[in-house]
Image (cartoon, rainbow, N blue to C red):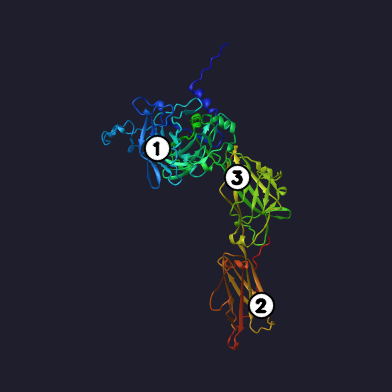
Amino acid sequence: MTVFVFITYDNLQNIQAERNLPLGVTEVELTNWTKTREPEEIGDGEKKMNSHSDRVELNEGISSEDVESIDGLYKSGNGYLNLTNINYVTSSSDKLDNVDENVEQSTQKVTGNKVLRAFLNSGSSIQLINYNIGDLHGYLKSDKPINWNDEGKVTWNLHTCVDPKNKVNSVELRMISASFNITSEQIRLLQNGNAYAVLGVPAENEYGFEPIMPYNDMVSVFLNGIATSINYECRPVTQSCKLNKFTINYKTTKSNYCWDKTYHQNLSSHTDGHHIHMDTLSGGNKGELTPLDLRNWLRKDKNNIDILIGNYITNSNQKNISCGFSKINLYIIEKPKIDVTMKLYKYKNGQVVYFDENYRPTKGDEVYVRIDIKNTSDNYTLKNTNFSRTGRSNQDNITVQMSPDNFIYNGNNITDDIRCYINEDFKNKYKIDALKSLQPKGVLTIMSDKMKYTVGDTNIKYKQIRLSGNISVNYIRDEFKFISAEKIITASISDEGGILEIKCSVENDDGLSEESFLINVESDKDFSNLSIKPGETYMLKNLSINDSYYINLVVPQDYEIVDSETYQGSSQNKINLSQMEAQNYTGKIEIQLKKKNNPYFYKNKQGKININVLDKSKDL
């Protein structure tokens, strides 16, 4: 029996749909592809290639008669060489001797959409070549669609030979262009910093794409007419130039940074294996997408991308290189979402009791620290979670470094003493290697009896215990790494760690007097009345160091105040404990009294007052 299979348009769409992308990744297709015309694509009656006049004879597979010789391709200005706008250059091709150059200038007009043979560089590290995107468009921009092969690749041949006199180097410049649309939802996601936008090629593997861009020998990417961070060359030749008058330092791609060398070289076989990794920077963090993230150059709705490609002609081996490009797309990759929190607790009757906003520890309390790591992502399982201290750790009260292999707390390795719990199931304990994997919406709790901290003056000053660092995870695939901005994690501390010491003394007192004096201590939030005997010191503890306190003695009629540095009878006596940091937030008040010379005239003398001292300390 013969079976016929008909593949319809709908079937083709389903086949394409089988290239599933990971959750959290959106493919934005680049369309309307065009490329600078090759000499063989240009018909009769038109020059097939443009060239600087000094290099017009350096031809490979093309007649010099078919090459436009351009005078004044570059002009000096502002300290660098500028590519001259195509409307202001003239052709020196086919000029006759003794002909007035002012006659029939229109016949010498240079036309664009052709390969441009140009300077490789200026030959000076000081005077760089500047290429403005508008001028590049004039020479290279095309409306000719690209004829991609079945693998989504396009190739071309070089038409420039090496200078036999070895005096000049050349580069052939081409431009590939496309457009794409970004939706309102996508631009909002990008502008809020919740996603990356990177270039890549479709791939028939489990991920559906590879974040690479094949090229050879030099490439610069413009988005909406602006030069981006993608400026690479496969060997250090150009090194530096200016794009839109901004200095560009070309980075060199190296195959030893490739994490899937065989597969990626297959995808870039038409460029001799050269390709850019959008998730790897030489010397940077392997797998991190931030350096080549394009979100800052994107806009809502239509976007235009121009890719400037240069092929070097520096030696005879260049004739054997493969030149081409791939049909790339833009990939919007949502960032992982991670929340790190810290809780403080103590043990009471063998049970864990947590502090909260209504029950906060204060100065001198010994507390235990609990750290929670929550994967708030909808799409990603987070792998190999790490937390590293930052350069600002001198501001921290607690320092933590953790990985699936180690846990360092305040400089001490307590890995073997760590206990982990998943999703607040405190019946099942795990070791620190639980950091290897955390499911979407999952919570990992880390505790240890060796994670202790004693609350000090700095904590009550800022009303918190603090630790900071960067958290890093792998996601989608082991090669992708997300590194968060610095996270500052805090737990609330009470600022009620201040102390007021009040002492009262009477001149010429023999210490036998049992008389007491009434003192009122008041703040915006509270007040206390103290009964103080001469010669004794009374303390008010657990006072807020951020409040101001007013101290007032109710002076008996037969006594008067002796002014001192800490208390005066003629003014309002105020103390700010926040200014007593050097004294451990302890304010000292000494009130001096003396009996009046003739107490006979004072009636209704103040009798003894027996008021209990109000102590705000708490039993924690």
The mark lying in front, picked from 1 and 3, is 1
Between disc 2 and disc 3, the foreground one is: 3
Residue neighbourhood size for the residue with mark 1, other residues' Cα within 10 Å, grouped as few (<14), some (14–19), many (≥20): many
Q: Judge whether residue 180 can be spotted in this image.
A: no
User: How many marks do you count on the picture?
Assistant: 3
CB within 8 Å, label 1 to label 3: no
Question: Is there CB contact under 8 Å for labels 2 and 3?
Answer: no
Q: Is residue 525 above or below residue 154?
A: below
Q: What element carries label 3?
A: strand
Say whether disc 2 or disc 3 marks the residue closer to the N-terminus: 3
Cα separation between marks 2 and 1: 92 Å
Kind of residue at badge 1: Leu
Is 361 rendered above or below residue 160?
Answer: below
The answer for how far apart the CA atoms under marks 1 and 3 are is 41 Å
Residue 177 placement: quadrant: top left
Where disc 2 sits, the SS reads: loop
Residue 584 vertical position relative to residue 121 in the rendered view, above or below:
below
**Residue occupied by mark 2:** 533
For label 1, the SS is helix
Q: What residue type is labelled 3?
A: Ser
Residue 350: mark in rendering: none
Q: Residue at x 69, y 82 (%)?
A: 511
What crowding class fits label 3: few (fewer than 14 Cα within 10 Å), some (14-19), or many (20 or more)? Answer: many
Q: What residue type is labelled 2?
A: Lys
Q: In terms of depth relative to the viewer, which is nearer, 364 or 114?
A: 114
Quadrant in the picture for residue 502: bottom right
Spatial CA span between label 2 and label 3 = 62 Å
Name the residue tied to disc 3: 472
* Outermost top residue: 1
Q: Which residue is nearer to you in this view: 380 or 245?
A: 245
Q: Determine which of the numbered discs, if any, sits on residue 136 in the image.
A: 1
**Rendered-image quadrant of the C terminus:** bottom right
